């Protein structure tokens, strides 16, 4: 496999960023290619060695227009290993079936207006944390949001 061929594959390492307010309202985004699929900010590292914090900042900016460097962004030190959806396997090297996701929390002062990446998301909503967890299709996203009260208390 040439370097050029290898570079077209996604790396199976990603971040999930739970964007939330101090009142534990959570930002969810609806995927353009999967109507009804609500999620937090997510995205894969762009290259081997990219720091996860950089990935989180980049993905928040790309998907919401929010500059995460202006707010408290914390690595929750939670990792989820999950099977990649079959409809997405073609994006990865042959034989790759699982992804390792690293969870971050981003505290913003209030429900901010969001500028969506139109190629990725069609809508956004702010929900109370329990409602947000229930709205997520992904078990790892749901579980991350359910950690929010505990992780929020750790910051104080």
Image: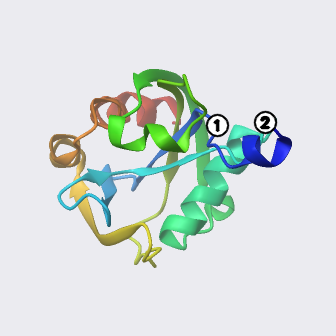
Residue at 48% x, 69% y is: 64
Disc 1 to disc 2, how far (Cα)?
A: 8 Å
Of the 4 image quadrants, the one containing the N terminus is top right
User: Does 45 sit above or below residue 34?
Assistant: above
Residue 71 occupies quadrant: bottom right
User: Does 90 sit above or below residue 41?
Assistant: above
> In front: 28, or 75?
28
Residue at 76% x, 39% y is: 51
- In x, y percent, where is residue 76? 54, 30
Question: Would residue 110 appear left or right of 54 to someone viewing this image?
Answer: left
Question: Would residue 143 appear left or right of 133 to someone viewing this image?
Answer: right
Label 2: state its secondary structure. loop
Q: How is the image coloured?
A: rainbow
Residue at 44% x, 31% y is: 151
Question: Would residue 57 appear left or right of 24 to someone viewing this image?
Answer: right
The 10 Å Cα crowd at callout 2, few under 14, some 14 to 19, many 20 or more, is few
- In x, y percent, where is residue 18? 43, 46
- In x, y percent, where is residue 14? 57, 38
Q: Which residue is mark 2?
A: 48
| Dot 1 or dot 2, earlier in sequence | 1
Q: Which residue is mark 1?
A: 11
> In front: 76, or 139?
139
> In front: 52, or 151?
52
Q: Which mark is residue 37?
A: none
Label 1 close to label 2 by CB (< 8 Å) = yes
Label 1: state its secondary structure. loop
């Amino acid at each position: 496999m040439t370097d050029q061929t290898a570079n077209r594959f996604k790396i199976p390492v990603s971040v999930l960023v739970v964007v939330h307010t101090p009142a534990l309202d959570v930002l969810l985004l609806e995927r353009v290619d999967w109507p009804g699929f609500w999620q937090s900010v997510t995205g894969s590292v762009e290259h081997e060695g990219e720091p996860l914090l950089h990935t989180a900042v980049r993905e928040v900016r790309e998907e919401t227009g929010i500059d995460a460097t202006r707010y408290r962004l914390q690595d929750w030190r939670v990792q989820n290993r999950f099977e990649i959806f079959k409809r997405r396997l073609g994006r990865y090297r042959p034989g790759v079936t699982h992804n390792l996701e690293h969870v971050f929390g981003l505290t913003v002062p209030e429900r901010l207006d969001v500028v969506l990446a139109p190629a990725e998301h069609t809508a956004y909503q702010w929900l109370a944390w329990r409602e947000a967890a229930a709205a997520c299709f992904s078990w790892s996203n749901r579980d991350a949001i359910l950690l929010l009260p505990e992780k929020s208390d750790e910051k104080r």
